[in-house]
Image: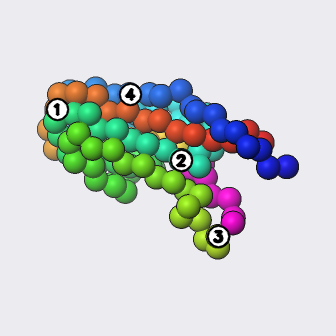
Amino acid sequence: MAKSFVKSIVATEVDASTLGVGLVPINVNGLDQACFLIRIINNSNVTILISYDGINAGDVLPPNNILQLDFQTNSAPNGFVANLKKGTVVSVDSTAPGIGLIFLCGYYQEN
Protein backbone atom coordinates (compact mmCIF):
# COMPACT_ATOMS: atom_id res chain seq x y z
CA MET A 1 0.00 0.00 0.00
CA ALA A 2 1.33 3.45 -0.92
CA LYS A 3 2.34 5.72 1.93
CA SER A 4 2.05 9.48 1.98
CA PHE A 5 5.16 10.26 4.02
CA VAL A 6 8.92 10.11 3.63
CA LYS A 7 11.83 9.84 6.03
CA SER A 8 15.37 11.11 5.77
CA ILE A 9 18.56 9.15 6.29
CA VAL A 10 21.07 10.53 8.75
CA ALA A 11 23.17 13.12 6.92
CA THR A 12 26.85 12.25 6.62
CA GLU A 13 29.88 14.33 5.70
CA VAL A 14 33.52 14.19 4.72
CA ASP A 15 36.15 16.90 5.13
CA ALA A 16 37.58 18.13 1.82
CA SER A 17 41.04 18.22 3.39
CA THR A 18 41.07 14.39 3.17
CA LEU A 19 40.66 14.41 -0.63
CA GLY A 20 43.31 14.15 -3.36
CA VAL A 21 44.57 10.65 -2.51
CA GLY A 22 41.82 8.49 -4.06
CA LEU A 23 38.13 7.94 -3.43
CA VAL A 24 36.94 8.74 0.10
CA PRO A 25 33.50 7.47 1.22
CA ILE A 26 31.00 10.04 2.45
CA ASN A 27 28.89 7.30 4.04
CA VAL A 28 31.36 4.61 5.14
CA ASN A 29 28.65 2.09 6.11
CA GLY A 30 26.56 2.62 2.97
CA LEU A 31 22.97 3.81 2.72
CA ASP A 32 20.84 2.28 5.47
CA GLN A 33 17.77 2.57 3.22
CA ALA A 34 17.03 2.49 -0.51
CA CYS A 35 16.69 6.22 -1.33
CA PHE A 36 14.41 7.71 -3.96
CA LEU A 37 16.28 11.03 -3.68
CA ILE A 38 19.80 11.96 -2.62
CA ARG A 39 21.47 15.33 -2.35
CA ILE A 40 25.23 15.91 -2.36
CA ILE A 41 26.27 19.33 -1.09
CA ASN A 42 29.80 20.40 -1.99
CA ASN A 43 30.44 23.12 0.57
CA SER A 44 34.15 23.19 -0.28
CA ASN A 45 36.53 25.12 -2.50
CA VAL A 46 37.39 22.18 -4.84
CA THR A 47 35.61 20.41 -7.68
CA ILE A 48 34.76 16.86 -6.65
CA LEU A 49 34.31 13.63 -8.58
CA ILE A 50 31.50 11.41 -7.25
CA SER A 51 31.47 7.62 -7.40
CA TYR A 52 28.53 5.33 -6.68
CA ASP A 53 30.50 2.08 -7.09
CA GLY A 54 33.82 2.97 -5.43
CA ILE A 55 35.70 2.63 -8.72
CA ASN A 56 34.35 4.94 -11.42
CA ALA A 57 33.46 8.63 -11.31
CA GLY A 58 29.77 9.05 -12.16
CA ASP A 59 29.33 12.78 -11.53
CA VAL A 60 31.32 15.99 -11.18
CA LEU A 61 30.31 18.76 -8.80
CA PRO A 62 31.96 22.20 -8.80
CA PRO A 63 32.76 24.02 -5.54
CA ASN A 64 29.84 25.39 -3.51
CA ASN A 65 27.20 23.55 -5.53
CA ILE A 66 24.46 20.99 -4.87
CA LEU A 67 23.67 17.86 -6.87
CA GLN A 68 20.18 16.45 -6.37
CA LEU A 69 19.30 13.09 -7.90
CA ASP A 70 15.60 12.23 -7.95
CA PHE A 71 15.44 8.59 -9.01
CA GLN A 72 11.62 8.40 -9.15
CA THR A 73 11.36 11.27 -11.62
CA ASN A 74 13.97 9.66 -13.84
CA SER A 75 12.55 6.11 -13.71
CA ALA A 76 11.43 4.47 -16.93
CA PRO A 77 8.86 3.41 -17.76
CA ASN A 78 7.07 6.05 -15.71
CA GLY A 79 5.37 4.79 -12.60
CA PHE A 80 7.98 2.14 -11.80
CA VAL A 81 9.99 2.33 -8.59
CA ALA A 82 13.59 3.47 -8.93
CA ASN A 83 15.74 3.84 -5.83
CA LEU A 84 19.44 4.07 -5.10
CA LYS A 85 20.19 0.64 -3.63
CA LYS A 86 20.41 0.13 0.13
CA GLY A 87 24.08 -0.32 1.08
CA THR A 88 25.40 1.97 -1.67
CA VAL A 89 28.57 3.76 -0.61
CA VAL A 90 28.94 7.21 -2.18
CA SER A 91 32.58 8.29 -2.50
CA VAL A 92 34.27 11.50 -3.58
CA ASP A 93 37.71 12.63 -4.73
CA SER A 94 39.44 15.73 -6.00
CA THR A 95 42.75 16.54 -7.66
CA ALA A 96 43.95 18.14 -4.41
CA PRO A 97 42.82 18.56 -0.79
CA GLY A 98 40.37 21.37 -0.20
CA ILE A 99 38.75 23.42 2.52
CA GLY A 100 35.18 22.73 3.63
CA LEU A 101 32.77 19.82 3.95
CA ILE A 102 30.90 17.59 1.50
CA PHE A 103 27.51 16.33 2.72
CA LEU A 104 25.24 13.45 1.68
CA CYS A 105 21.53 13.58 2.46
CA GLY A 106 18.80 11.24 1.29
CA TYR A 107 15.11 10.41 1.51
CA TYR A 108 13.21 7.12 1.46
CA GLN A 109 9.79 5.56 2.08
CA GLU A 110 9.39 2.66 4.47
CA ASN A 111 7.98 -0.56 3.08
* Residue at left offset 16%, top offset 44%: 95
Horizontal side of 28 relative to 94 (left or right) equals right
Q: Earlier in the sequence, mark 4 or mark 2?
A: 4
Q: Are marks 1 and 4 in contact (CB under 8 Å)?
A: no
The residue carrying mark 2 is 37
Mark 4 nearby-residue class (10 Å; few <14, some 14–19, many ≥20): some
Decide: is 77 above or below 4: below
What secondary structure is marked by label 1? loop
Please tell me whether mark 2 or mark 1 is closer to you in this view: 2
Nearest to viewer (mark 4 / mark 2): 2
Horizontal side of 70 relative to 59 (left or right) equals right
For the residue marked with disc 1, what is the amino acid?
Gly
Q: Are marks 2 and 3 in contact (CB under 8 Å)?
A: no
Specify the principal SS of the magenta part: loop
The residue that mark 3 highlights is 78
State if disc 1 and disc 2 touch (CB < 8 Å). no
* Residue 21, percent from left and from top: 22, 37
Residue 13 is marked as 4
Residue 87, percent from left and from top: 58, 40
Q: Up-down: is 101 above or below 106?
A: above
Find the distance from the CA under tag 4 to the CA under tag 2: 17 Å
Q: Is residue 48 visible?
A: no
Pointer 1: what residue? 98
**Residue segment shown in magenta:** 79-85
Instruction: Say which of 29 and 32 sits in front.
Output: 32
Assign a secondary structure to mark 3.
loop
Residue 1 in sight: yes
Check disc 3 and give the amino acid type. Answer: Asn
